[in-house]
Image (cartoon, rainbow, N blue to C red):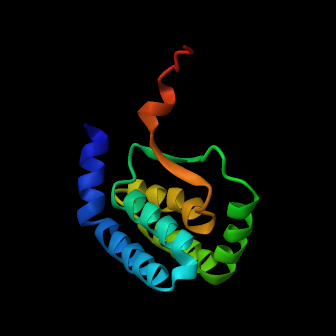
């Protein structure tokens, strides 16, 4: 229940809606430039993650190989560094107040996602804690 309340407050006050719109616009631009479609998919993943970050985390995607690593290097040069810097500055500004600390931490949690998004997937934290049953 606490995660739900934090996500609602993040959506309204913590810039979650603004971040999701920004990442969505970046995805549309990447889809329009056909060659950058993988970056558009990564931007949509970031929009989804930034819209509702509490209770979710990023994990390495199985099967992501050299191609996603090389594309991440290009992403860092073109967009990743300033997106990560934006999250760091916003997180530091939010951590100035006691009420803003959870939102600042959420911004810090988005830094690796903004810096290196390809080859990762957004998963629920509860799904990581469940034991898998081998069949």
Question: Percent from the top left, x then y, of residue 21?
Answer: 33, 75
| Relative side of 62 to 22, left or right | right
Quadrant showing the N terminus:
top left
Residue 95 visible within the image: no
Q: Residue at x 56, y 78 (%)?
A: 36
- Asked if residue 76 is positioned above or below residue 129 in the image, the reply reads below
- State the image coordinates of residue 97 (x, y, percent, origin top left): 39, 63
| Residue 93, horizontal then vertical, whole percent | 45, 71
Quadrant into which the C terminus falls? top right
Number of numbered discs overlaid on the protein picture: 0
Viewer-side residue, 126 vs 75: 75
Residue that appears at 37% across and 74% down = 24
Position of 123 compared to 52: left or right?
Answer: right
Q: Is residue 129 left or right of residue 24?
A: right
Q: Please report the residue visible at 66 percent of the width from the left and 52 percent of the height from the top.
A: 64
Q: Position of residue 119 (x, y in %)?
A: 62, 55
Q: Inspect this view and state whether residue 71 appears.
A: yes
Residue displayed at 48% across by 72% down? 40
**Residue extending furthest toward the front:** 34
Residue closest to the eye, 61 or 55: 61
Q: Which of the two residues, 125 or 63, is positioned nearer the viewer here?
A: 63
Compared to residue 56, the image places residue 112 above or below, namely below
């Amino acid at each position: 229940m606490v995660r739900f309340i934090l996500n609602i407050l993040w959506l309204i006050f913590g810039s979650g809606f603004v971040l999701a719109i920004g990442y969505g616009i970046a995805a549309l631009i990447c889809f329009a430039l056909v060659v950058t479609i993988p970056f558009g998919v990564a931007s949509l993943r970031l929009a989804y993650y930034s819209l509702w970050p509490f209770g979710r985390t990023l994990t390495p995607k199985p099967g992501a190989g050299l191609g996603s690593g090389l594309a991440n290097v290009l992403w860092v040069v073109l967009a990743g560094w300033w997106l990560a810097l934006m999250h760091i500055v916003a997180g530091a500004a939010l951590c100035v107040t006691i009420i803003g600390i959870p939102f600042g931490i959420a911004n810090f949690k988005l830094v690796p996602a903004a810096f290196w998004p390809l080859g990762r997937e957004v998963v629920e934290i509860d799904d990581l804690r469940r034991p898998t049953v081998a069949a």
